[in-house]
Amino acid sequence: MSPSKSASAATKAFLPRKPFDWNKLTWGRPDSVPSALCSYCSAVIPENEVPLIMSNSEGWTVRFCEKCMKEIWGFQ
């Protein structure tokens, strides 16, 4: 399989489960300290957890707690 096909397949596979409201996200500014709260449900993300962190092309970020990682993104 060529690298472009692999990258395309990985991108397509990483989609939120439904229902998911992109408007509900609280985005962190590029020049700010990362929040200790989940960007979707506002739960506290403990220091010993590794959150899912996504960013857009401008550097704004969202962080997901373990519960949202499982329910929204299908992490196990």
Image (cartoon, rainbow, N blue to C red):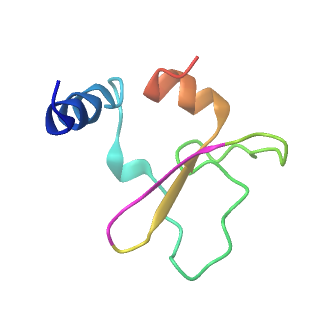
Name the residue at the front extreme.
2
Q: How many marks?
A: 0
Q: Was residue 52 drawn as part of the magenta stretch in this picture?
A: yes
Name the residue at the top extreme.
76
Image: magenta residue range: 51-57
Viewer-nearest residue: 66 or 13: 13
Residue at 64% over, 43% down: 51
Q: Position of residue 37 (x, y in %)?
A: 68, 53
Which image quadrant for residue 16? Answer: top left
Q: Position of residue 59 (x, y in %)?
A: 43, 72
Residue at 31% over, 31% down: 15
Q: Is residue 7 left or right of residue 42?
A: left
Q: Position of residue 1 (x, y in %)?
A: 17, 23
Which image quadrant for residue 6? Answer: top left
Q: Was residue 6 drawn as part of the magenta stretch in this picture?
A: no
- Residue 69 versus residue 23 in the image, above or below: above
Residue at 34% over, 52% down: 23
